[in-house]
Image (cartoon, helix red, strand yellow):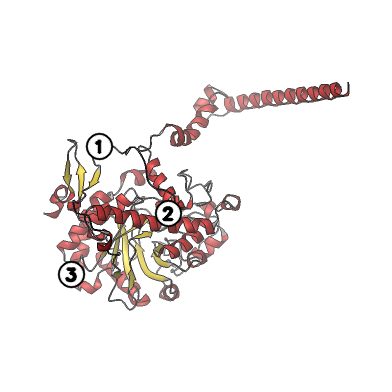
Amino acid sequence: MHELNWFMWGLDLFSGLFLIIVGLGALAIVYMYIADKLQTKQAVRHNYPVIGRFRYLFEKQGEFFRQYFFAQDREELPFNRAERSWVYRAAKNVDRTIAFGSTRPLEATGTIMFMNSAFPPQDEEITPIQPLTIGPHCRVPYTTSAICHISAMSFGALSRPAVTALSHGAAQAGCWLNTGEGGLSPYHLKGGCDLVFQIGTAKYGVRNEHGHLDDGKLNEIAAHPEVKMFEIKMSQGAKPGKGGILPGVKVTEEIAHIRGIAQGQDSISPNGHIEFNNVGDILDMIARVREVTGKPTGIKAVLGDVQWLEDFCNEIERRGEASAPDFFTLDSADGGTGAAPQPLMDYVGLPLKESLPILVNILIKHGLRKRIKVIASGKLIVPSRVAWALALGADFIASARGNMFALGCIQALQCNKDTCPTGITTHNKKLQHGLDPRDKSTRVANYNHNLHHDLALIAHSCGLTEPRQLKPSHVRIVLESGLSVSLDKYYSHINQ
């Protein structure tokens, strides 16, 4: 009898709760109906109150369902599941082999294939990657044996634990980390890795009150032994012709202090350096930064109009080879960013597959290829893409998004909203708690080690003892006919 009373009491309680929930649901529907009919900003909601709301819900959730349930391994953009899966496994240092056969279509136009040799080198014939020196004539030249490095990502665009993890990971991997245009933060320095300090159009960290370059602040940055090189950013692949964009919601007090800007306001860099009116001005700034710092100085740009590059090389010839930049970081039109106008990201600039051969050929034509080291950047996150870039003439590659995947990025496409679910591109402390810099730094190091390892596998299969020996003749590309041609013939029109 006692148990029956308890049962009846519980039944009454749940019945009451059910009625309350139904009542609240009915009130919510009435409220949404009235609100939808009264508003005029969204026609679907006005004409189909309550039900019309599902349209916006499905639109928002669609990108997530496509990623996990509907997209095939090789069709998702900007990075497909197969590419991301390789990076995740490389970062975790787990088995990277696959079974049964490749899911990669080999007949699709633009597919690249490396030509294996009948006589690959034996283990004892394989040589380690040779060190390469950038800026040998500078007071403090920089030498590294790493091919793959971490591309520009600012503190601000990235969170504190993310930058900390990248710094420690780069130190473990023996590669450099580019600071991005947001200035030098304590978190870039925390791991003791090699750093490339980027000077953006706003000159954050090295600007005076008028937005011009400040030699004293340049000296302070160069005094850090971790800072090995300086990169003058002219343009970026994802937003050529537009400066950096950091939404105000991500401009915290600390970031505002490092950049020298107002807290909570959008950080919008100028479209270009106010000092630049012609190619001579670019060389003047390169010379100034190199003289003040004593360290290798180069430029970063995405190619569009090529005539300026010809004029640039002509001016170097007129002034002398010593006036040339020590390196040229070439970004691809399909490069990444935290925030950019869609028209620029989708339609402006040349992708790396076209711009890299053009740049290398122009440097050869003007006798500057040995003087200026080429750093390629833009979707080079897997060994095959790195090997392809080396074959086309790059000396180094730099990847940002590959290392973001190593940190745990899930391609949620929320970098510009301060709502990144993995804590990488948000300053929300709650979301950052899931990102442990100690664990993620190991994954960054693993990713870079395995990237070099599998890059060497491709080179060895082509009969070479080290990756920088790759040439266009080692790679073929599939044409519309379904047949392939070697890259040296494919790009013969550029080399004429």
What is the distance, in whole Å, between disc 2 and disc 1 at their CAs?
A: 28 Å
Determine the residue positioned at 53% across, 59% down: 438
Marked residue nearer the N-terminal end (2 or 3) = 3
Badge 1 marks a residue whose secondary structure is loop
Residue found farthest to the bottom: 139
Q: Residue at x 40, y 41 (%)?
A: 81
State the image coordinates of residue 246 (x, y, percent, origin top left): 47, 54
Precedes in sequence: disc 2 or disc 1: 1
Residue 250, disc: none
- Closer mark to the observer between disc 2 and disc 3: 2
Q: Label 1: which residue?
A: 108
| Residue identified by numbered label 3 | 317
Q: Nearer the viewer, mark 1 or mark 3?
A: 1
Q: Is residue 273 left or right of residue 371?
A: right
Amino acid under label 3? Glu
Q: SS for tag 3?
A: helix
Amino acid under disc 2: Asn
Mark 1 touches mark 3? (CB < 8 Å): no
Q: How many marks?
A: 3
> For the C terminus, which image quadrant?
bottom left
The numbered mark at residue 403 is 2
- Between 102 and 213, the one lying in front of the other is 102
Q: Rate crowding at label 2 as few (under 14), some (14 to 19) or many (20 or more) other CA atoms within 10 Å.
A: many
Q: Residues within 10 Å of mark 3 (few under 14, many from 20)?
A: some
